[in-house]
Amino acid sequence: RGPGAPRRETEDAVANLDECIDDLTIKFAQGTDFFRLLVNVFAAQLRGEDQVHLGNFYAIIPPLTINFVDHMLSSKDQLAKGKRGVAGAFCDDGFMLGVVYVLR
């Protein structure tokens, strides 16, 4: 290996990424509905007897959403000001997806 050659770990990581992309390409071409798969997995868990307390979850969604939007606006402002460490927070969509799964 020359001084500019990639390390073995890098080559392994690239090969792994290629395999993942190939797998996803095949599954999307087959029409696999990933959203439905996730909903089906979580729906059974969230409707169990030990999750009865989630029956009224819909009531707290408005204040949670306001808090989430406030957090996103704050993260966007910090990102615009050049502060480090907030770029990932600005791209966060996990809250909304989580709400969809619980409500579904």
Image (cartoon, rainbow, N blue to C red):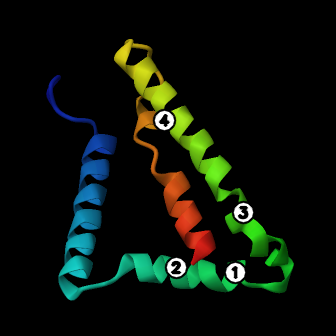
Camera-side residue: 82 or 10?
82
- Callout 2 amino acid: Val
Spot occupied by residue 92 in the image (x, y as percentages of width and height): 46, 44
CA gap, disc 3 and disc 4: 22 Å
Residue 59 in the image: state x and y as whole percent.
72, 63
Asked if the residues shown at circle 2 and circle 3 are in contact, with their CB atoms under 8 angstroms apart, the answer is no
The residue that label 2 is drawn on is 39
Q: Identify the residue at horizontal 31%, vertical 49% (top origin).
A: 13
What residue sits right under mark 3 in the picture? Answer: 59
Q: Amino acid at mark 3?
A: Ala
Quick one: label 2, few (<14), some, or many (20+) residues within 10 Å?
Answer: some
| CA gap, disc 3 and disc 1 | 20 Å
CA distance for labels 2 and 1: 10 Å
Q: Secondary structure at mark 1?
A: helix
Instruction: Give the mark nearer the N terminus: 3 vs 1.
Output: 1
In this view, the mark in front (3 or 4): 3
In the displayed structure, does residue 1 sit left or right of residue 36? left
Say left or right for 48 vs 21.
right
**Badge 1 amino acid:** Gln
Mark 3 element type: helix
**Residue that numbered label 1 is attached to:** 45
Q: Earlier in the sequence, mark 2 or mark 4?
A: 2
Percent across and percent down for residue 66 are 59, 43
- Chain-order first, disc 3 or disc 4: 3
